[in-house]
C-alpha cells in the first residue's frame, strides 16, 4: 500500500481510532500496575512496560496478519471481530484486579503481561484493518500507544460524556469485520463483481451490531431505572 494514497491514510486513521477505543482497560491496568512505586519510578515503569507491550503487540499482530492468509481464517477472524464489536457496546462496568508491583521490574513485567492478556481484541481488529500491511500496524501502534498512556484519562472522560463515541467505535469495528469476511478469498470469488452485495452485507453487519448493542443497553438502563425507582418506594 502506497503511503501517498488516501487508502493508506484512511487505514492508518482506522487503526489508531480502533486502538484508542479498545485500549481504555489497558490504560487503567497500566496505572494500577505502577501505583505502588515511588513517583520517580512510575514513569520509567510505564515507559519500559509499554515498550515491551508494544513489541509483543507488533509481533502478535504480524503473526495474525500472516495467519489470516490461511483459507477461511479471515472469515473466522471477521466473525470474532463482530463479537468484539458487540461486546464493546455492551461491556459491563467492572473492577480490574491487578496486583501492583513493588519494584520497578515487577511493575514492568505486570504491564507487559496484562497488556498481552487483554490485547487479543486489539490484535485481531488491527490485523483486519491493516489489510495485511505490517507497516500500518507499526505506525498505528507507535501513534496510538503514547496517546493511550498520557491521554487515557481524557479519552475515557470523553467516552463517558459522549457515549456515541463508543457506538462510532463499534460501527468501525463492525465495518472492519465485514470487510475481513468479504475479503476471504472463497467468498470474494463467490460474489465476483457483484459489488452491491458487498455493500449490502457491510450495511447489515454494521446496523445489526449497533442495533443489538443499543437494544441491550436500553433494556439494561430500563432495569436499572426500575430498580432505582423501587428502592425509593416507602416500605
Image (tube, rainbow, N blue to C red):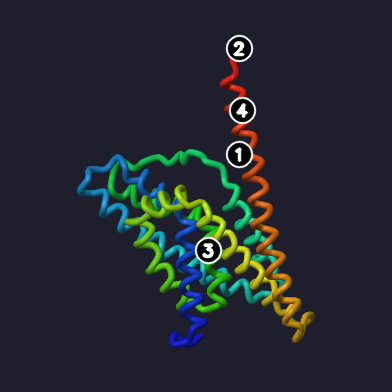
Label 1: which residue?
Answer: 221
Considering only vertical position in the picture, is 38 above or below 60?
Answer: above
Question: Dot 1 surroundings within 10 Å: few (below 14), some, or many (20 or more)?
Answer: few
Task: Give me the residue at 61% from left, 51% from top.
Answer: 87
**Residue 235 numbered tag:** 2
Question: Dot 3 surroundings within 10 Å: few (below 14), some, or many (20 or more)?
Answer: many
| Quarter where residue 185 is shown | bottom right
Image coordinates of residue 40 in percent, x first then y, are: 20, 48
Label 3: which residue?
Answer: 123
Circles 3 and 1 in contact, beta carbons < 8 Å: no
Task: Give me the residue at 29% from left, 52% from top.
Answer: 45
Could you tell which of marks 4 and 2 lies nearer the N-terminus? 4
Could you tell which of marks 1 and 2 lies nearer the N-terminus? 1
Question: Dot 2 surroundings within 10 Å: few (below 14), some, or many (20 or more)?
Answer: few
Considering only vertical position in the picture, is 178 above or below 113?
Answer: below
Label 4: which residue?
Answer: 227
Marks 4 and 2 sit apart, C-alpha to C-alpha, by: 14 Å
Identify the secondary structure beneath mark 1: helix
Marks 3 and 1 sit apart, C-alpha to C-alpha, by: 31 Å
Along the viewing direction, whichever of 164 and 114 lies nearer the viewer? 164
Could you tell which of marks 2 and 3 lies nearer the N-terminus? 3
Amino acid at each position: 500500500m502506497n503511503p501517498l494514497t488516501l487508502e493508506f491514510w484512511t487505514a492508518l486513521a482506522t487503526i489508531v481510532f480502533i486502538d484508542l477505543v479498545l485500549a481504555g482497560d489497558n490504560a487503567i491496568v497500566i496505572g494500577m500496575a505502577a501505583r505502588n512505586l515511588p513517583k520517580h519510578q512510575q514513569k520509567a515503569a510505564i515507559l519500559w512496560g509499554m515498550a515491551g507491550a508494544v513489541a509483543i503487540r507488533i509481533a502478535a499482530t504480524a503473526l495474525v496478519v500472516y495467519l489470516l492468509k490461511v483459507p477461511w481464517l479471515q472469515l473466522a477472524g471477521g466473525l470474532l471481530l463482530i463479537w468484539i464489536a458487540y461486546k464493546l457496546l455492551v461491556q459491563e462496568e467492572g473492577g480490574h484486579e491487578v496486583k501492583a508491583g513493588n519494584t520497578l521490574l515487577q511493575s514492568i513485567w505486570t504491564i507487559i503481561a496484562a497488556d498481552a492478556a487483554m490485547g487479543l481484541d486489539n490484535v485481531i481488529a488491527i490485523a483486519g484493518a491493516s489489510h495485511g500491511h505490517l507497516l500500518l500496524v507499526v505506525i498505528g501502534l507507535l501513534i496510538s500507544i503514547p496517546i493511550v498512556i498520557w491521554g487515557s484519562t481524557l479519552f475515557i472522560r470523553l467516552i463517558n460524556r459522549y457515549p456515541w463515541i463508543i457506538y462510532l467505535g463499534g460501527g468501525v469495528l463492525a465495518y472492519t469485520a465485514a470487510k475481513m469476511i468479504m475479503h476471504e478469498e472463497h467468498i470474494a470469488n463467490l460474489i465476483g463483481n457483484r459489488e452491491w452485495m458487498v455493500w449490502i452485507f457491510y450495511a447489515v453487519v454494521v446496523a445489526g451490531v449497533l442495533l443489538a448493542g443499543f437494544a441491550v443497553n436500553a433494556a439494561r438502563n430500563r432495569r436499572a431505572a426500575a430498580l432505582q425507582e423501587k428502592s425509593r418506594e416507602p416500605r
